[in-house]
Amino acid sequence: MKAAIITDSSATLSKDIASLPNVYQVYLTIRFSDGEEFIDSSDADQLKAYYQKLAADPGIPKTAQPTIQQYYDAYDAIIDAGYDTVFVFTLSGQLSGTNQTANVVAREMSDRIESHVIDTHSTSFVMECMIKDTLASLEAGEDAEAIVKKMEWLSVNSPIYFIVDNLDYLRKSGRLTGVAAFVGKTLSIMPILKFLSDGRVDVIEKVRTSKKAIRHLADHVEEALANYPEGIRLIAAHGEALDKMEMLLKELETRFGQDPVRTGYVTPVVGAYGGPGCLGLGIIPSLNNFSD
């Protein structure tokens, strides 16, 4: 098997992974009410400019999934390069139509290449971690069926917990029920949200301060350590919330002596859902916990 990977830009790939010859990306976009458009990116300069505008703009930007042509172009390049198999990773199908588009193209290309489309039920560095695990499995010579089983297991066992300063970004983008957003606003609380195992986002806890919210995030790490005796990996990402990130890293170090394997900004598309000040903690079990 000679395999390639396609992922959408919300995976926040590091330069090392993005530059690999068998890794291809398709890009979401974000448009503000004044017409200015950003291509989803993990470039530091673009991120700084984007979050400055997001904080200053009174509206909620609109996001758009990758065009179907981007997928066609990626497939054509992959096939021309001699690959016979492609693994396609998408952000949660509950957040975007990206997964649906990827499946449409995979079916159309089925006579030319074998495709495996994986709804990660997640986004950001969790997706990146799944891609890294896939690359390691390919290097180890595992077959496609075994890899897909592992990735599907990770997709329902790798939750992201996060806090936001303003639920309106999720509510107005249609990624959260109006009831949940209303509760957060009327009670003047800081909600803790979770990507559920099916990729939906919902409020799971309500606290009064950032400090308490950080402690609650760490409580979920404690639960995961008990549930996955072969170890876990932590990732932490934020949307211009360096103060909260610092608090979280300190809490994780104090309680568990464990730093996240990956930290940084979420891409503009994910930031458009969470808004300025969002902070997420992803918990990814080691594949040593997996049993078929």
Image (tube, rainbow, N blue to C red):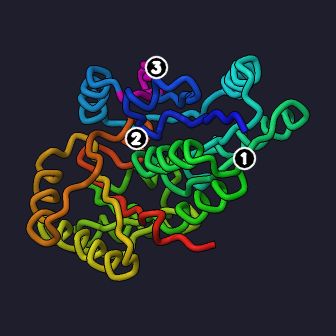
Residue matched to label 2: 272
Q: CA distance from mark 3 to mark 1?
A: 36 Å
Residue matched to label 1: 116
Q: Nearer the viewer, residue 34 or 173?
A: 173
Span shown in magenta: 31-42
The residue under the point 55% across, 23% down is 21
The residue under the point 64% across, 51% down is 142
Per the image, label 2 sits on a secondary structure element best described as: helix
Residue 47 image offset from top left, x and y in percent: 30, 28
The mark nearer the N terminus, 3 or 1, is: 3
How busy is the neighbourhood of tag 2: few (under 14 within 10 Å), some, or many (20 plus)?
A: many
Any magenta on residue 183? no
Tell me where residue 55 sits by quadrant.
top left
Per the image, label 3 sits on a secondary structure element best described as: loop
**Callout in the foreground (3, 1):** 1
The residue under the point 61% across, 30% down is 66
* 235 relative position to 286: left or right: left
Residue 8 visible in the displayed image: yes
Residue 143 image offset from top left, x and y in percent: 70, 51
Residue 252 image offset from top left, x and y in percent: 16, 64
Tag 3–tag 1 contact (CB < 8 Å): no
Q: Nearer the viewer, residue 141 or 211?
A: 141
